[in-house]
Image: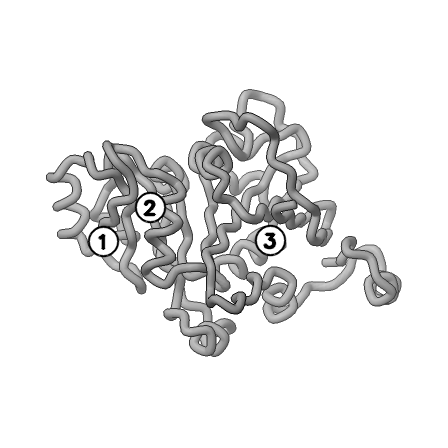
Amino acid sequence: MRRLFPVTDVTDETAAAEGAAGREWSLAELAAAYAYPEPGPEGPAPWLRGNMVSTLDGAAQHEGRSQPISCPADMRVFGVLRALADAVVVGAETVRQEGYRPARARAGFAAAREAAGQGPAPAIAVVSASLDLDFSLPLFSSPLVPTLVLTGAGADPERVAAAEKAGARVIVAGEGAGVDPARAVHALAELGHTRLLTEGGPRLLGQLIAADVLDELCLTVSPMLTAGEAQRIAGGPSVTLPRRFTLSSMLEEDGFLFTRYRRA
């Protein structure tokens, strides 16, 4: 892996020494490259980053899954971003399609998480209006950290009871059946989860963008072309004016670009 941006004397010297292929970065180096912002004088504030992958022609999936357009380096970044987070926010459809499992503890991050006051692994926070979820899956039945379910006040009481019986913690974050993104972020922060990561899917990411609660996007650009009618990384409601983000960093390995954009 090579750092392409920001360009500094160190960047140039490192690239020259490593050659075109670069080298595999350590977990500590990746963690430093993707560190969350330091808390301000008033203490930690919620920071929501998204992590997505897209092909050159804009596809976020191939045959319904993101794995075919990913690569080992992308999965290393994926693991590091999870290891840095307090909670991973994900849509119910992505849970169903991707076969989500509980986040696992990683020995390489155990000391850092303990020093940061974090649990052994991030909590998975599933956003679902209908609660149409299989609560017998390991994500609910045997997580290292109890899974959270974000839903609306109008959710089916029987489904709420089923989620709680399975061991999940249900959080009401919206009126009616739907979830209000800003209220969801606030509710998670009240639980101490201020370092937030969302892995989509596209519908959820679109809702977060439309609600203007996304602070950062970590986008892997995959050097592949798929054509077809695959989803983009974000769908759903459009915004009145496009949101402007600023490039914070860009890494490269094997033709894959690992970009990091923040609010302008």
Amino acid at pointer 2? Val
Circles 3 and 1: CB distance less than 8 Å? no
* Residue drawn at point x = 70 percent, y = 38 percent: 223
Tell me the CA gap for discs 2 and 3. Answer: 26 Å
Q: State whether residue 155 is above or below residue 77.
A: above
Q: Earlier in the sequence, mark 3 or mark 1?
A: 3
Amino acid at pointer 1? Ala
Amino acid at pointer 3? Pro
Tell me the CA gap for discs 2 and 1. Answer: 10 Å
* Residue drawn at point x = 76 percent, y = 58 percent: 2
On residue 126, the disc is 2
Nearer-the-camera pick, 123 or 221: 123
Q: Earlier in the sequence, mark 2 or mark 3?
A: 3
Q: Position of residue 97 (x, y in %)?
A: 38, 37
Q: Position of residue 38 (x, y in %)?
A: 56, 66
Task: Label 3: state its secondary structure.
Answer: helix
> Please, which residue is most extreme toward the front here?
42
Q: Is residue 144 visible?
A: yes
Residue that label 3 marks: 72
Task: Label 1: state its secondary structure.
Answer: loop
- Crowding at dot 2, Cα within 10 Å, few <14 / some 14-19 / many 20+, comes out as many
Residue that label 1 marks: 168
